[in-house]
Image: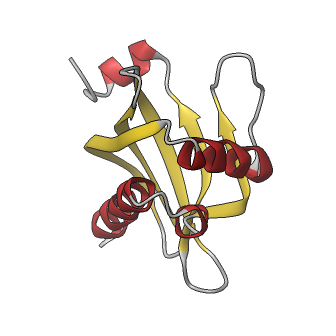
Amino acid sequence: MSEEIAKQWLEKAVTTAADKDHAAHMNLISKKVTLRGVPGYENIGYDDWSAQTLHEFEDNILKSISYKGYKPLISTLTHIMFKTFEIVEANDGKVNAQGIEILLEKEDDAEWRLVQERILPEDEAKHDGLFD
């Protein structure tokens, strides 16, 4: 069940980005989100994430997002933590591919939202078998 929920969430992230639907995309992300592991930043919160996403959608910077692999870590009635490999491709040909750890939380309105994302060091992602 938790793998199904996680994979549905990832699918929604991909389709809302492809559709450049900022409101729907940000609805997948909790207002209390923290993103860790971005070089040059300690943590990125909801407002910065939202502004960056809006910029990427409006300026047609983003070509596609995709995910490969699924490594479950923790699953409870209200939380699902897993690792996956994310590939973000820009329209200028740049590709950012990295292992990530995702924590989804079932919020009060019963929606599953991203509350924490951590970009994995390359050696950890390799160790977890997320890429060769």
Q: Nearer the viewer, residue 35 or 13?
A: 13
Q: Nearer the viewer, residue 83 or 65?
A: 65
In which quarter of the view is residue 109 placed?
A: bottom right
Where the C terminus falls, by quadrant?
Answer: top left
Above or below, 105 relative to 110: above
Q: Position of residue 44 (x, y in %)?
A: 74, 38
Q: Position of residue 83 (x, y in %)?
A: 39, 41
In this image, 69 relative to 106: left or right?
left
Count the numbered circles shown: 0
Q: Position of residue 3 (x, y in %)?
A: 30, 62
In this image, 67 relative to 99: left or right?
left
- What is the residue that sits farthest to the front in this orientation? 59
- What is the residue that sits farthest to the left in this orientation? 132
Q: Residue at x 32, y 20 (%)?
A: 127
In which quarter of the view is residue 107 placed?
A: bottom right
What colouring method underlies this structural image? secondary structure
Q: Residue at x 29, y 73 (%)?
A: 1
Q: Residue at x 50, y 47 (%)?
A: 102
Above or below, 113 relative to 117: below
Q: Residue at x 41, y 23 (%)?
A: 92
- What is the residue that sits farthest to the bottom in this orientation? 109
Q: Position of residue 125 (x, y in %)?
A: 37, 24
